[in-house]
Amino acid sequence: MSLSIVSNPSCFYLSSFLLYVLLVPVSVKCDELGVSDSSGSSSSVPSKIGNGYSLISIESSSDGGIVGYLQVKNKNDIFGPDIPSLRLYVKHETEERLRVHITDAEKPRWEVPYDFLPREKPPPLKNTIQKSRKIPLSASDGSLSGTQLIFEYKPDPFSFSVKRKSNGQTLFDSSSSDSDQFSNLVFKDQYLEISTKLPTDASLYGLGENTQPHGIKLYPNDPYTLYTTDVSAINLNTDLYGSHPVYMDLRNVGGQASAHGVLLLNSNGMDVLYRGNSLTYKVLGGVFDFYFFSGPSPLDAVNQYTNLIGRPAPMPYWAFGWLFGFTHRTLLLTRQMVIRADQFWIEVECLNGKFAYSDWTSLSPIGALSGISLGVIVASIILPLCFHQCRWGYHNLSVVEDVVENYNKAQIPLDVIWNDDDHMDGKKDFTLNPVNYPRPQLLAFLDKIHSQGMKYVVIVDPGIAVNSSYGVYQRGIANDVFIKYEGQPYIAQVWPGAVNFPDFLNPRTVAWWGDEIRRFHELVPVDGLWIDMNEASNFCTGLCTIPEGKQCPTGTGPGWVCCLDCKNITKTRWDDPPYKINASGIQAPIGYKTIATSAVHYNGVLQYDAHSLYGFSETIATHKGLQALEGKRPFILSRSTFVGSGHYAAHWTGDNQGTWNDLRYSISTMLNFGIFGVPMVGADICGFYPQPTEELCNRWIEVGAFYPFSRDHANYYSPRQELYIWNTVAESARNALGMRYKLLPYLYTLSYEAHTTGAPIARPLFFSFPNYTDCYSLSTQFLIGSGLMVSPVLEQGAASVKALFPPGSWYSVFNMTQGVVSKEGKYVTLDAPLNVINVHLYQNNIIPMQQGGITSKEARMTPYHLVVTFPGGATRGQAKGNLFVDDDELPEMKLGGGSSTYVDFCASVDQGTVKVWSQVQEGEFALNKGWTIQKVIVLGLSGTASAVDIQVDGNEVAGFSSVAISTSEQQLNEDSDFGSAVSSVMVEIKELNLPIGKNFAVSWKMGV
């Protein structure tokens, strides 16, 4: 038989150098996600499993919660035997947060470690079950009421619901009726299932990481599988690098919106089925540990969520500048695969040729086809023939120096230069290539860029090369830091060849890792670390040994082809669980191209349970190591993330493609990570591979300049794509990045807000306009903060963009005399020639800006100005904003100690009098820096400004004769439903020289 796989529609995309081949027998029947039982057929699996559990006793716990005891109703062996007795624990942990925890009543089960994610512990099992068994349960339903949420339960079959106390709205309901497609509670050792009913008009967001082609809003019947996987972001609706089992539910009843959040804290692989009117979790193990966050606003929900999982990490100021990285890593694009199982023949039609392979077993590290019970055949294929002219990266320091110089010549801002593993000796972590990156020359280069305020970040992969002459490996073996398989360090393959993976659950590993970071920093004073391949990625599968008598890798072909001697592992239930999640979008074995799931961590923890925590655990260890260096604020960029990763690191969205679709997808992924508590996020600008068109790169830098994390990361198999390569792209970069650097005070203040409240930096429009339902599905525009709206061009050949403007007044930040006024909200077609990005500021805001520069250090030394916005033609109104400045090298981002200043800005207009003033906290730091406000721009006024009155610290200030005031007419695109035309002016007051560290007040009259 033959199978032709064609995707999207003419390309079948391969992730991170791997080619997945799916061979499915025609006779197999599948459920919604195509999963099956261990026999390869789901025909024997009913749509509902069992009859759930009965609640047989319940009592109050000593900490203010309740503890219940559940017993299975009818046992069955589908996906394994039921756990007969469960313990239920419920507690309102705060006024806004409810916890529902369900686990085995008799023995502990795997949970996300409490030292990784600090939180309250449920009562010990042995102390609660015996007491609760003594207390009979009445036949009636019950509840536990809190300040904002109510927990209600039904005893037989057991189900629970969570309701909003203010209006009785049901937020979560696990009951299952005969007409429902889902089961009651199912709890087995390797299969957990629970569902909730949902109103069909609920808007859900979250459940990642994946690339969602339909936009930010969850789409019914799309697959949502959570299992950290090295699968490139060009694959749609597939489990990617991170696991975030949290969603936000936004509902609008009678014109009044409310949002809440739901987290299932579980690190095991899972499928989440969203049908539009229900949501079902199917999990491979662990416990049900639900947290419900009452909101009611989207910002409230994220605030409550990050209060539990950890506030986002403080970022150094330079991290908000423009970053440029380069890599030699690639991914393959094919147009079509044809598989003939009877002939073991594969035909791959590449972008520039067609190649056939006849020796299947030599291509597959898995070995015999019969070893995969699912009928899934996965092959790794040698693919350099698809690409003829290639560039492996910046192989020597002189190329890096040229890049920096060319950015400077083009007058394009640049703050950080990045190295992939080209700087390494043999691709080994924490080493330096003595030929291509000689240390004396590299240190001289770093001295030069550091003096200019620039920074240097390098990559680190978790795999440590197995090499007896390699000091990092020697010390790792001596400290016994590696993950084990049958008592020996587990062998895998990544870029340097055979590697062992550090076990970051082991305290000794964390100490050893920190020491290696220290040693490397003494060799090369890097400013941050980029941790990649930490899902963890493995070029091989199964139990591998280093081949004798041959070099591995050979050094002549692609480094991602498995060259170890490997055999498949299916002998344990951890490697071949009874339920198959939709891993990699094809039900791939969960141990494929990663650490074997029967491998063992510290204290006997199975990789099966801890797999999706691997990148998170490395992030924590890396953060600890960096922070110990010089007491400075760490900067870490991690590809793999989990719940709480934002507390330590930034994230980029992985290997994308230089296409218009990928540009559009990047917005949804970025916005989702804000909900996940990882606000410092961005995509590879202009695409990772292949080279984008000139037009696309123009449009991408216009969008990417407003990503919180803004970096051009390119693969150098494709031609060069630095922003100065094309003149038009350079112009777009100067325009868009020029505005970004003017907005750095605003962005950095937003990062302080994120660190203290969890608020995303980049936000969906519904965060600021929750009652405006037109923006619930909007994924082509976004906000920076509460009121700065970015409306990019996302279509090839377009010279305009149709943008949604929620009700109110919006002003262009590139031309503040232009704006849009809308009473009810409307779409407006905006001019957008090639070098133009439309960015508008909403009414009632005050944002701090500076004059920009080539580096953030240069920009930070320029005078400030304030932009104040009122509704168009306002005679009465208020506006507010704020500013946070600090010593950004200090580990903490907080007020106090003379190292920071916080300013609230306020403005009002009332019957012709305009006033702008400040309220300063801890002003000493800003005063010592000499920072001043030179200009105030006020938009949306009516009339003409007259003489200005100025006060500093409550005292009238004389001698401001140099202050200049001017008035300019504004042109506003208005709704036809306004009774009369809106007349509006911009007032600009210059030469103020107001100290930021002191309270000031500036006022004037508006005349006719």
Image (cartoon, rainbow, N blue to C red):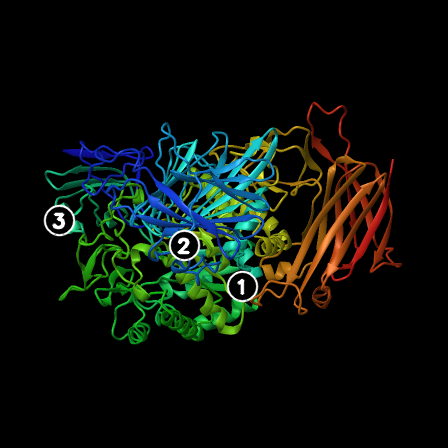
Count of residue discs:
3
Disc 3: CA contacts within 10 A as few (<14), some (14-19) or many (>=20): few
Number of the label disc, if any, that sits on residue 314? none
- As drawn, the residue found furthest toward the left would be 343
Disc 2: CA contacts within 10 A as few (<14), some (14-19) or many (>=20): many
What residue is rendered at 35% in x and 72% in y?
434
The residue tagged 2 is 639
The residue tagged 1 is 454
Q: Amino acid at mark 2?
A: Arg
What residue is rendered at 12% in x and 42% in y?
344
Q: CA distance from mark 1 to mark 3?
A: 53 Å
Q: Quadrant of residue 211?
A: top left
Say whether disc 1 or disc 3 marks the residue closer to the N-terminus: 3
Q: Quadrant of the N terminus?
A: top left
Q: Amino acid at mark 1?
A: Met
Q: CA distance from mark 2 to mark 1?
A: 23 Å
Q: Nearer the viewer, residue 653 or 186?
A: 186
Q: Nearer the viewer, residue 417 or 102?
A: 102
Q: Quadrant of the C terminus?
A: top right
The percent position of residue 896, horizontal first and vertical second, equals: 67, 66
The percent position of residue 992, horizontal first and vertical second, equals: 79, 55
Q: Nearer the viewer, residue 318 or 822?
A: 822
Say whether disc 2 or disc 1 marks the residue closer to the N-terminus: 1
Helix, strand, or loop for circle 1?
loop
Disc 1: CA contacts within 10 A as few (<14), some (14-19) or many (>=20): many
The residue tagged 3 is 368
